[in-house]
Amino acid sequence: MEGNDYLGEEVSSNVQRYEKMLRNKTKDYFDAEAIEGIIDFYIQNDKLKKAIEAIEFGKELYPTNIPFWIKLAEVYVLSKRFEEAMEELEKAELYEPFSADLFLLKGEVCLNLDDLEEASSLFEKALMYADERLDMLFEIAYVYEDNDKFDEASAYFELIIDEEPALEQAYYEIAHCSDLLGNHEKAIKYLDALIDIDPYNTGAWYNLGITYSKINNFEKAIEAFDFCLVIEEEYTIARFNKANCLVELDRFADAIPEYLSVIETEGGDSITFCNLAGCYERIGRLEDARTQYKKAAQLNPNLAEAWFGIGLTFEKELLYKEALQYFKRAILLESDNLEFLLVLGECEYRLGHVKEAEDVYTKMTELDPTMMESWLDWSFLKYAEGDISAAKDLLLQALRFDPTCHQFHFRLVVYLYALGFIQEAHKHLEFGLTLCFEDHFLLFDIEPKLKLQIAIMTIIEANRP
């Protein structure tokens, strides 16, 4: 039995003996170290009330044992009773004025009370009296990290690296803190430094890949994941993330064997099957996509994306009736998903369900009145149904939410021309051209005959950059 295993067994045995004593309402003997182990057991298992009871028991047996006072302060900190924690620590300091753990805990209390300057001073005292300086540097850094003071935490982890460059955990922690601060370049710098020390560190390569992917540098992320996989071929989480990066680069065919490899190694989960299905869908292999989406839905019937994906494969085959039921199943799971609703609205309309489609667009504009596509699709439905005045009114309403949406202005040109409001149409055309000249082709996507209108072509040429 390893030493740590033995200690664990001993603590567990002491906890059982202590709890039996409480049940029997007897008084057994425990040495101070055993009681500290019992207290730590309760703290680690988030049984703070029992920890306090064990501390009080320890104080009765050993009233001058100051570590019990410090333990009580620790429990108060965990319970966010900071003033009470400080009271205990102040009393303990009178008897143990050189305790590193005491100053560490006082510093944590001050952090929670927003006294950052005093906290910093107390942490320096903790360092001064610590038997193991590096251990204390880690402790202080973790306290800052736990309190979302990531700049300060990072500074201590940097001190650790200065004193002991081979401690890889410090590199990971700096990368983590930098990531939370949005300073991805710093995270990359320290992960690169760790790789320089240990080129075969799969964790460093993996985290480097994750960091590059967060700044959308997917090529560098793939390169990092590839190094990770060269070192450890079955590092499936790296392969999975490599596949995700390939998808981001629209390299769907390249991503497929990576997802398949993950499935072969790990057995596959609903997300992997869903991602694989998306790749098949994007390259037109709709039957294969549908098969994988169905596997994802079988594994996780609550995964809306899988049901929606099945619907998309049918929609792309123009099988709108078959698609509709799957779109509705997805929306039952995610009723506020605007992407799902947009596709559902179009599907309903293509099936001739005009009222149902309008109900969908109404819901979308209520959920997010700034969503351009819902207004455009709804107004086009009205236009296609011959209610051009209603189409125009919808876009005028949409402009109240986003007056600088050039698509609204260009579409209004189409509707206003159809209604005979030529001058008003020209005003929207000119304004739309100032917003985004290169998208003026959108006019002709809806109504190609507008190319024959000399006034329109003249305005376009006059506003050409």
Image: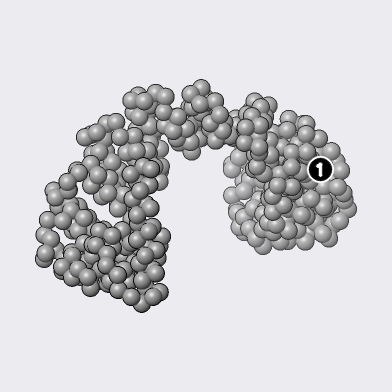
88 up-or-down from 398: above or below: below
| Residue depicted at x 73% and y 33% | 280
Mark 1: amino acid: Glu
Residue 177: image location, x then y, percent: 36, 44
Q: How many numbered markers are drawn?
A: 1
2 up-or-down from 94: above or below: above
Name the colouring of the figure. Answer: one colour
263 up-or-down from 180: above or below: above
Residue 338: image location, x then y, percent: 67, 53
Residue 81: image location, x then y, percent: 31, 69
Which quadrant would the C terminus be assigned to in this image?
A: top right
**Can the viewer see residue 107?**
no
In the displayed structure image, the side of residue 140 where residue 428 appears, left or right: right
**Can the viewer see residue 236?**
yes
In the displayed structure image, the side of residue 313 where residue 99 appears, left or right: left
Q: Secondary structure at mark 1?
A: helix
Along the line of sight, the residue nearer the viewer: 254 or 437: 254
| Residue depicted at x 66% and y 27% | 257
Along the line of sight, the residue nearer the viewer: 161 or 438: 161
Along the line of sight, the residue nearer the viewer: 3 or 269: 3
- Work out which residue is located at the far bottom of the displayed protein and give it: 25
In the displayed structure image, the side of residue 245 where residue 215 appears, left or right: left
| Residue depicted at x 56% and y 29% | 234
Q: Which residue is mark 1?
A: 315
Residue 61: image location, x then y, percent: 22, 70
Q: Residues within 10 Å of mark 1 (few under 14, many from 20)?
A: some
Along the line of sight, the residue nearer the viewer: 355 or 281: 281
| Residue depicted at x 14% and y 63% | 93
Which quadrant would the N terminus be assigned to in this image?
A: top left
197 up-or-down from 458: above or below: above
